Amino acid sequence: MILALVFLFALVIEGTLSLIPLVFVILLNLLIIKRDNSIFYIAFLAGIVLDLLSVRPVGLTSAYLVTFFLAVLLYERKFEIKSFFFITLASFFGSLGLLFLTSFSSVIILQAIVATCISLIVFKFYESRLGVL
Amino acid sequence: MRRQTPTFLFLFLIFFSATFYLLGNAGSLGFLEKGLQPVQKSTFGFFNFFGGVGKSEELSRLKEENLNLSKKIVDQKKLESDIAAFRNQFETETIRTSDLLPSEVLGIKGFVPNITPPEYLVIDKGSADNVRKEDAVVFKDNYVGKVERVSIFQSKVLFPTNSAFSTSAKTQTGVLGVIKGQGGGEMILDNVLLSEKISVGDLVLTGPDTDLNGSGASPNLIIGKIVSIEKSELFQKARIKSLIDYSTLSRVFVFRGR
């Protein structure tokens, strides 16, 4: 319930006010921890909403999120993805790619760094709450 | 045991993303935009209210006064040049109310809301209201930005400080240049000839920027004020500060002078 509220809050904030990819980092953490296919549906719908709110080509964010998350699951076959190292890399490069596609900002590297920090905080929260590690 | 990679699900969702992309381009998703607008308005209104709590009324009043005085300077300069050149009525440019489309701001996006300078805003008017790409957006006699992307019921407006922004401009004394956004709330007046004289404190106005379709800015809208000047071998450039606080805008006007 709390997670759903946090996710909705992030969706509305990112769609209306902020350029930090909050939805991406929350969904990435959810995917890595829960490894549930329903994350793909949520990512698809969230991408459509974000594109509509931000006046972007509709479907662009959805396609990116779904593709990136599939790549994460493919990587899972060979390596351990439930680690701080992987979360850091995936959050940074994933955010950078998304911002490169969708943002007009001149500080996308800084935004990707902030997104990575938020992602690590979310992961740490899961770790303490759910004992995922 | 490892789960199967959801390749089929992936292809299914990519297919739907492409479908939404085509529907969006065809203008068939207007009902979704309309449906989401109340959420945007409420969120933006809520944060705009709390963002303005720390700003004193005195400061807002002084800013308002500053805007009005700047407008008077521009009007006076324009009047002087009008008299000097005996311009006929067709050559004098002012914004007519009938050329303006009132629009509500649905969202102002920046790195950190209300802390870092915003990059662009979203308004509740789109192609259904005859808004077109490159149309100018104004507030009083101040230039707010230009429309970068239009959907059925919404438009995205780039601020002049956005790094993707550039437009022709002139100072109040008629010196021509190009305004270029630098990101992070900064913009410069570039490509000013060394032989031209510009000074700190000069107002920078929109230049003739209308395209063949009639989209673009009306001349003589205030973009900002020169705060510093740098000279290179060929050109000089000036750093510009806007007179309006973009993050406090809640209603703007789309200029449709065509």
Image: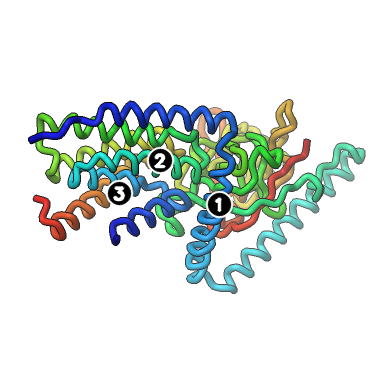
Q: Which amino acid does label 3 sit on?
A: Val
Judge whether A7 appears above or below A95 on screen: below
Residue wearing tag 1: B37
Residue wearing tag 3: A114
Locate residue A35: give its quadrant.
Answer: top left
Tell which of B198 and A15 is nearer to you.
A15
Q: Residues within 10 Å of mark 2 (few under 14, many from 20)?
A: many
Q: Which chain carries label 2?
A: A
**B130 relative to A110 in the view: left or right:** right
Residue wearing tag 2: A47
Q: Which amino acid does label 1 sit on?
A: Gln
Q: Which of marks 2 and 3 is in front?
A: 2
Residue B155 percent across, percent down from the top left: 59, 42
Q: Mark 1 lies on which chain?
A: B
Residue A74 percent across, percent down from the top left: 19, 29
Q: Which residue is drawn at 53% across and 31% down?
A: B23
Tell which of B170 and B167 is nearer to you.
B167
Tell which of B108 and B210 is nearer to you.
B108
* Distance Cα–Cα, label 3 vs label 1: 28 Å
The reply to whether discs 3 and 1 touch (Cβ–Cβ < 8 Å) is: no
Tell which of B93 and B196 is nearer to you.
B93
- Residue B232 seen anywhere in this rendered image of the structure: yes
Q: Which amino acid does label 2 sit on?
A: Gly
